[in-house]
Image (cartoon, helix red, strand yellow):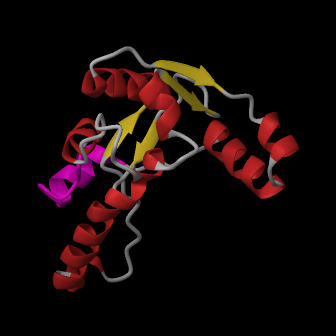
């Protein structure tokens, strides 16, 4: 979730446009770095339950359109989702970034958030809560303030 605070996303969202290279209705799995640490600490404390297991983490699952709605609510102004064609990343950036975007567009993560919330109660943050806790709407704050 902290990625949305970066210079290539947040300023535009604060102005009312959420540009992103994934289809508007494609569910995306979101997680905070804080939650990664909290779950890692929990797993280490209860290691016998988790030895040999892989855990795909997510604190929330939202489409880009739903994220734009969440940004709108917390900012108190409309934020419109704008899909960026993935080929732009191939032209302007690196092939590896294009490949990553294609993976998100076609596959993406598959975490079971409901099950994770049961396994790790109180350790996973919904997107709207993250936006509120980080004071997203305060345009004076930057990624470094997190």
Instruction: Check the image and report above or below for 121 versus 55.
Output: above
> In x, y percent, where is residue 140?
34, 43
Q: Quadrant of residue 145?
A: bottom left
| Residue 106 shows up from this direction | yes
Residue 49 percent location from the top left of the image:
22, 78
Q: How many marks?
A: 0
Residue at the spot 22% in from the left edge and 53% down from the top edge: 124
Residue 63 visible here: no
Q: Position of residue 68 (x, y in %)?
A: 42, 24
Residue 23 at what x, y percent from top left?
60, 26
In-front residue for pair 91/41: 91
The residue located at (32%, 26%) in the rendering is 70
The single residue placed furthest to the front in the displayed view is 140
In-image side of 127 versus 24 (left or right) = left
Location of residue 48 with respect to 110 vertically, above or below: below
Reply above or below: 47 against 129: below
Which is more toward the observer, 57 or 7? Answer: 7
117 on left or right of 110: left
* Quadrant of the rendering where the C terminus is positioned: bottom left
Magenta-colored span = 112-125
Q: Residue at x 52, y 21 (%)?
A: 81
Report the residue that reaches farthest toward the right.
91
């Amino acid at each position: 979730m902290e990625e949305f605070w970066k210079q290539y996303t947040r300023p535009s969202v604060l102005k009312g446009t959420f540009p992103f290279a994934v289809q508007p209705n494609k569910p995306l799995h979101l997680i905070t770095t804080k939650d990664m640490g909290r779950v890692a600490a929990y797993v280490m404390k209860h290691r016998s339950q988790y030895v040999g297991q892989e855990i795909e983490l997510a604190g929330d699952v939202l489409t880009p359109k739903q994220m734009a709605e969440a940004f709108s609510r917390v900012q108190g102004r409309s934020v419109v989702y704008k899909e960026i064609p993935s080929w732009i990343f191939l032209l302007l950036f690196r092939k590896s970034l294009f490949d990553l975007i294609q993976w998100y567009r076609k596959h993406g993560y598959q975490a079971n958030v409901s099950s994770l919330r049961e396994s790790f109660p109180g350790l996973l943050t919904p997107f709207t809560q993250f936006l509120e806790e980080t004071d997203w709407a305060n345009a004076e704050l930057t990624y470094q303030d997190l």
